[in-house]
Structure formats: structure tokens, C-alpha cells
Amino acid sequence: MKEYVIATNNAHKVAEIEKELAGKVKLVTLKELGFRGDIAETSQTLQGNAEQKADFVYEKYHKNCFADDTGLEVEALGGRPGVYSARYAGEHCSFDDNIDKLLEELGSTTHRRAKFRTVICLIEEGKKYFFEGECKGTIALERYGNGGFGYDPVFFPDRSGESFAEMSMEAKNSISHRGKAIAKLATHILKGC
């Protein structure tokens, strides 16, 4: 069975990707490799951060690996928070802090178009591949729902009457940016199985 290192310790991400790969490859987390630190993300682009993390793992462990980066890009804010989505309100902020800052910056503007984007960088036998997924939608004026994480309570995907936080995990994954990028990654990896 082929083995891939996933450059995360996020159990939710690992479970989501394992489901797509249907048990045909073995996923190894950073924790399982004995790595406990943080990998720098200093690029100004999602692709750059995903590549930086994958490069780090490949150079350190010499194993096939992949990494992702995700950002929320809001049109009225010139694409912010983008690569700073996870720490928009500061280095050690909570999801709620980030949402508060986003809603405060948008104020009462009616132009609330946004999109989530995920970029995955795969390094396989030393060769790099990139897979991208996006989900367009609108930022609500307030929070809706208790599920999900991050900006899910204020993000309404197009053609949906629910926020990501109101959807079941299956419904969200079927249309989400990360779900689309993972599906492309899985198609590529499973071709070789």
C-alpha cells in the first residue's frame, strides 16, 4: 500500500481525506512521524504556503507528502483575510475573534461577496502537483448555526439557504472548497493504485 504524509495534525482534515482515498493508501500524520513543531507559513499566497509546508516535509523525511492552505477572500476587503484567515484578529485569536473582526470591517455594506479557496501541494517521487478548490458565497450580517469551524457561521455558499455551520458535514464537504481540492487530489493519487 502506498504511503503519503499529510502535513497536518488536524484530525478532521485527516478523516475527510481518508474517506476520499477509500483505504487504498496509507496516510501518516506529522505526529506519527514524531514531528511536534509548527511549519512556517510565510508566503503571501495560499499556493506558496501549501508548497512551503510540503517542501519542508519532503526535505526532512524524503516521503511522498501533501499539504494544504485555505483562505477566505472577501471582495469588499480587497481579498482579505486571505492567507491571514486563521490569524486575522491576531496571532493567538479564536474563531470568534476572527468573525468579529470580519463583521466589524464589513459593517453594513451590502457588497458581501466572498469565496473560500483551498490549494493542495502534493510532492510525489520528487515531482510537484497542485490541486485547487473554491466555493463562492456571501458573508452574512450575523452568525447562523453551531456546526463547523472558522468562518462557517457567517458564510452562505451560493444556491444554499444555510450557512456552512448549519449544514451537515456531508453536505458541506460535497460543495466546499476543501472537498473539491481533496477530490482532485484523490483522483490523482488513486490513478496509481
Image: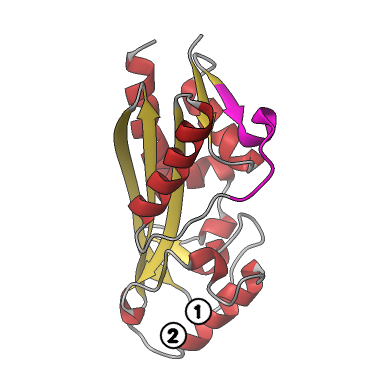
Q: Which mark is residue 66?
A: none
Name which quarter of the figure residue 125 lies in. top left
Which of 24/140 is in front? Answer: 24
Q: Is residue 69 visible?
A: yes
Name which quarter of the figure residue 77 lies in. bottom left
**Residue sitting at x 40%, y 27%:** 186
**Residue 59, x across and y down, in percent:** 46, 34
What residue sits right under mark 2 in the picture? Answer: 106
* Mark 1 burial class by Cα count in 10 Å: few <14, some 14-19, many 20+: many
**Residue sitting at x 44%, y 51%:** 69
**Residue 142, x across and y down, in percent:** 56, 78
Cβ–Cβ below 8 Å for labels 2 and 1?
yes
Please say whether residue 33 is one of the residues in the magenta stretch.
yes
Which of 47/70 is in front? Answer: 47
**Residue 92, x across and y down, in percent:** 67, 70
Real-space Cα separation, disc 2 to disc 1, in angstroms: 6 Å
Q: Is residue 53 left or right of residue 47?
A: right
Of helix, strand and loop, which one carries label 2? helix
Of helix, strand and loop, which one carries label 1? helix
Q: Is residue 82 above or below residue 185?
A: below
Q: Is residue 95 left or right of residue 180?
A: right
First to last magenta residue range:
27-38
Say how the picture is coloured. secondary structure
What residue sits right under mark 1 in the picture? Answer: 102
As shown in the figure, which amino acid type bears the numbered disc 1? Leu
